[in-house]
Amino acid sequence: MNLVLFSKRLLWGIYILKLIYEEVCCEQVPCAARSYGQSSVICVCNATYCDTVEPESRLTQGYANMFISTLAGQRLEKSVINFTQQPSKTAQVTLEVKPQIMYQTMLGFGGAFTDATGINILTLSLPAQYHLIQSYFGRSGLEYTLGRIPMASCDFSTHTYSYDDNPGDLDLVNFSLTMEDIKYKIPIIQKAQSVNRQKILLFGSPWSAPAWMKTNQNMTGYGTLIGNPGGPYYKAWAKYFVRFLEEYRKHNITLWGLTAQNEPTDGYIHNFPFQAMGWYPDQQKDFIALDLGPALKAGGFSDVRLMILDDTRLNLPYWAEKVFSQESSASMYVSGIAVHWYEDFIAPTLSLDVTHKEYPDKFILATEACITSNFPSKVSLGNWENAEKYTHSIIEDARHWVTGWSDWNMALDMEGGPNWVNNFVDSPVIVNAKADEFYKQPMFYAMGHFSKFIIPGSQRIEMPQVTSLEGFESIAFQRPDGSLAVVILNRGTSPVLTAIHDPVVGYLTQTVPPRSLITFTWWR
Ligand SMILES: *[C@@H]1O[C@H](CO)[C@@H](O)[C@H](O)[C@H]1NC(C)=O
Ligand SMILES: *[C@@H]1O[C@H](CO)[C@@H](O)[C@H](O)[C@H]1NC(C)=O
Ligand SMILES: *[C@@H]1O[C@H](CO)[C@@H](O)[C@H](O)[C@H]1NC(C)=O
Ligand SMILES: *[C@@H]1O[C@H](CO)[C@@H](O)[C@H](O)[C@H]1NC(C)=O
Ligand SMILES: *[C@@H]1O[C@H](CO)[C@@H](O)[C@H](O)[C@H]1NC(C)=O
């Protein structure tokens, strides 16, 4: 082992010891706030300083943990409050928790290990990298439990590449992972796993097959696989998934899931600017039934959860109805339906409800979201509205059968990249390499209000939505140990004196400040 590698391992070891120490002590390290002129602030982390979240306390009955984030600058600040037996006479709203009425079981919350995520993390000094990974995955951080891995390149890469750019190599004898996996994805995933006390459910998604497998001989633009399902190119493409799973397994990374294609509708858009491959739902159905399903089974990967769609819910329930049609065996290979948030404003939640009703044994998972609309620059440092958009989407999705929510890039640069087609967007963590700093945006804490508390295996429970107050949203869950968690979002400009009524414990009365986000947890 050379000296550099040895010192890196030593530093990492010391860092793990520090984490263990923090776990058995610790008070919250507060946000080092900085304003960039937006509605709220970002929290600055560097090599020597990074804010943390104080762990939940295991409270006796009658008390609740409360974690609050506000436009005014609080970030997952913890306190303990108590229940009362009588309702407060002045409460403006009462939220009735009904744990006997249960809905879907949650898989988790997370983000994507894109090339851009890895590239940005690696521009930081080693101690700052540790803080970033800890912030997302550690005990004193958000404890993410979902991770999406682009299979080869996407727009958040520095160039286009596949795992087999050898025209005609239908047997994939020259299939190999690239420098990007070895440098930007695998080590980051391994570090994330090493600080996480929960298992991270990892799932892969391809953007495009190698250009030579496609009708347009290009990873971008309008095109699909050559030939028909059951044909040689479809067989090769199915094998590509198996080879990907095998190669990651060689690095001790076991994938939990796969989506059959990222945004299959993009590849049927003329001149689509970045990596994409077009699929119609019938085509995806036949590919899964004839090629991908059998290939995964033969490769020993039948336990890998296969998801269809991986595109906006505007395509539902139509897409699911096609893929799961009775005449085909596709359905038996498929575990879930993946959705992206980008057209939610024109696609009613009814599409999710109908899909769940028709296919109750297929989970629905939100697999990509990001803020694309900031103006004038794509990165908006300290923007509170973006945190509200994330929270609103998570609550809305989870109220309509969605079992988890995975964000897009976990770390971008000050411009919102790198992205080889300049399709810059925002991210919950922005890295400023020059200053060796990274910035936790309000969106980061919005994710934490769910990921840290709504742990995998939690079940959504009934708590009717209050419709009388504009911008006031809420949701309740029961966690695997029987404790309850409630998240409230107040997008309004007035404080709301809120009572949460748990028939077993009593009334929890709390003023929910304007423009705030609160998570409550309690045992009964
Ligand atoms: C890191 O952040 C802390 C807290 O904001 C600050 O006191 C310290 O000077 C920073 N270190 C560097 C090298 O900028
Ligand atoms: C419980 O909370 C109420 C206000 O909600 C407060 O008046 C009371 O003193 C608290 N009781 C205890 C035991 O902390
Ligand atoms: C695999 O790669 C080797 C070395 O580049 C090349 O000689 C060979 O033709 C390739 N095979 C296929 C089937 O692409
Ligand atoms: C793929 O399409 C892009 C965009 O039209 C074009 O610039 C590029 O040259 C094409 N690549 C190949 C290998 O044809
Ligand atoms: C994978 O894990 C095994 C057992 O823990 C270990 O022996 C092996 O070196 C690991 N391989 C890699 C590539 O990390």
Image (cartoon, helix red, strand yellow):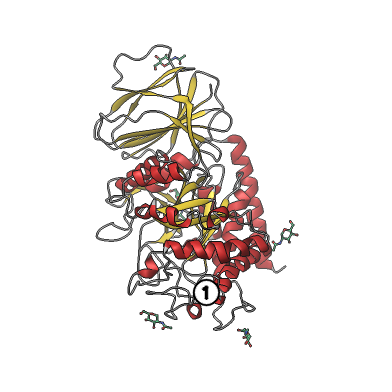
Query: Does 178 appear above or below 485?
Result: below
Residue at image x 62%, y 46%?
18
Beta carbon at label 1 within 8 Å of ligand 4: no
| Number of marks drawn | 1
Query: Does 81 appear above or below 120?
Result: above
Quadrant of the image occupied by residue 20: top right
Percent of width and height locating residue 340: 40, 54
Q: Quadrant of the N terminus?
A: bottom right
Residue at image x 57%, y 66%?
291
Mark 1 closeness class: few <14, some 14–19, many ≥20 residues within 10 Å: many
Residue at image x 49%, y 61%?
285
Any part of residue 279 in sight: yes
- The answer to whether residue 142 is left or right of residue 6 is left
- Secondary structure under tag 1 reads loop
In this view, the residue in front, 122 or 511, is: 511
Percent of width and height locating residue 469: 26, 30
In this view, the residue in front, 7 or 263, is: 263
Query: Does 310 appear above or below 466?
Result: below
In this view, the residue in front, 524 or 403, is: 403
Quadrant of the image occupied by residue 467: top left
Q: Residue furthest front?
A: 327
The residue carrying mark 1 is 162
Percent of width and height locating residue 325: 47, 55
In this view, the residue in front, 243 or 235, is: 235
Task: Name the residue type under label 1.
Answer: Ser
Q: Residue furthest top?
A: 86
Any part of residue 30 in sight: no
